Amino acid sequence: MNSGNRGRLPVTVVTGFLGAGKSTLLRQLLLSSGLRLAVLVNEFGEVGIDGDLLRSCGFCPEQELEGRVVELANGCLCCTVQDEFLPTMQTLLQRAEQLDGIVVETSGLALPLPLVQAFQWPEIRSRTRVTGVVTVVDGEALAAGSVVGDPAALEAQRLADPSLDHLADIDDLFLDQLEAADLVVVSRADRLADDQRQLVDQRLAGQLRAGVSTVWMERGNVPAALLFGLERSASDPAGHDEHHDHSHHHDHSHVAMQSSVVRLVGPIDRVLLEQRLQALIQRHNLLRLKGRAWLPGKTHPLQIQAVGPRLECWFDTASQLPPGETGLELVALGLSLDPAALEQELQPSLGLAFA
């Protein structure tokens, strides 16, 4: 996959408290995804070691490390957006042709939303797209009644940056992280009994936006397709293989993802399509939705990407369409899918026929 042909480089924001499992997740993503990713790390003070951990995992040639792992250690990213984040992103984007995507790992004390909003700055909005905010939660700590596993380390991190002016109660900050999430990843699932998982589910219940799902993670293993919607072996714009319709994917991550492919033909209204897709995501608890649509009178396909309730559609100017061709092709990813229900819900509501 060549990001240069895609226009805007996909960005995933990974947030969560210090020790929640963010770096473990990133190490596994870098090693197993096959994607050419750059990582922007924002841990600071005495605990700013994430950059070194990522550099040492062997995910890319040593000569590329300087441009693939960038560490901002001079303060909390959401407080230094203009001074540090924007220049750093501009530098990374100079190498956009050599990258499939960017991961931003925030400080455990960062507010995710100001960072996401920073991607709307004119200097970078035309060259990037935020594919999702992933909030990593320490399942073991939450099951024990705390939102953070090591409160002392978190306090040391706070004291290391006197410029922090947004820090309120830790529980309030945790709620901010959950409210910003498009996907919640609960770490240390292998250490939790069933009753402890139920406690975690109860603690998270009601704190997430409609359409946001929870995925359990063991030792950092989560499918790259969930975090980025990118697969190195993808052979078509929707990013799937023709032989995997309605399939179950079981891999080393132990996340039993299911995928369903929907193909429909006929004229489509973009506004109606986006409304139907948002409803579909919420009703079926979809983790990710990706695909393309061919709209009447348009010469370029409409690309579709969603992580949880975060839906983005844009015209892919790098691709041309045959005159008069209209239709829709989608790949849905989830933990429990009913392919027939997905098709039957979309087909009549959009007035389309099955391909």
Image (cartoon, grey):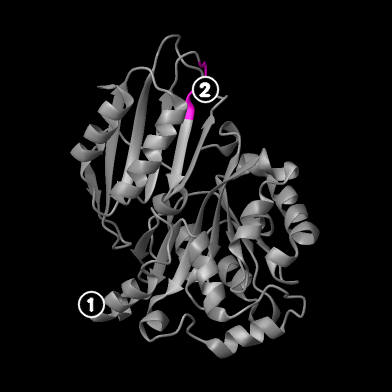
Question: Residue 286's x, y, as percent?
Answer: 34, 49
206 vs 242, nearest the viewer:
206
Q: Mark 2: few, some, or many residues within 10 Å (few <14, many ≥20)?
A: few
Q: Is residue 239 visible?
A: no
**Residue closest to the far top:** 323
Q: Is residue 322 visible?
A: yes
Question: Residue 20's x, y, as percent?
Answer: 48, 75
Residue at (66%, 59%) from the top-left corner?
Answer: 114
In the depicted structure, whether residue 115 falls above or below residue 122: below
Circle 1 residue: 194
Tally the marks: 2
Q: What residue type is disc 2 on?
A: Ser
Magenta span of residues: 298-302
Query: Which type of secondary structure does the marked residue at label 2 adopt?
Result: loop
On residue 280, which mark appears?
none
Q: Quadrant of the C terminus?
A: top left
Q: Mark 1: few, some, or many residues within 10 Å (few <14, many ≥20)?
A: few
Circle 2 residue: 319
Question: Residue 298's x, y, as percent?
Answer: 51, 16
* Secondary structure mainly formed by the magenta segment: loop
Q: What residue type is disc 1 on?
A: Asp
- N-term mark: 1 or 2: 1
179 vs 190, nearest the viewer:
179
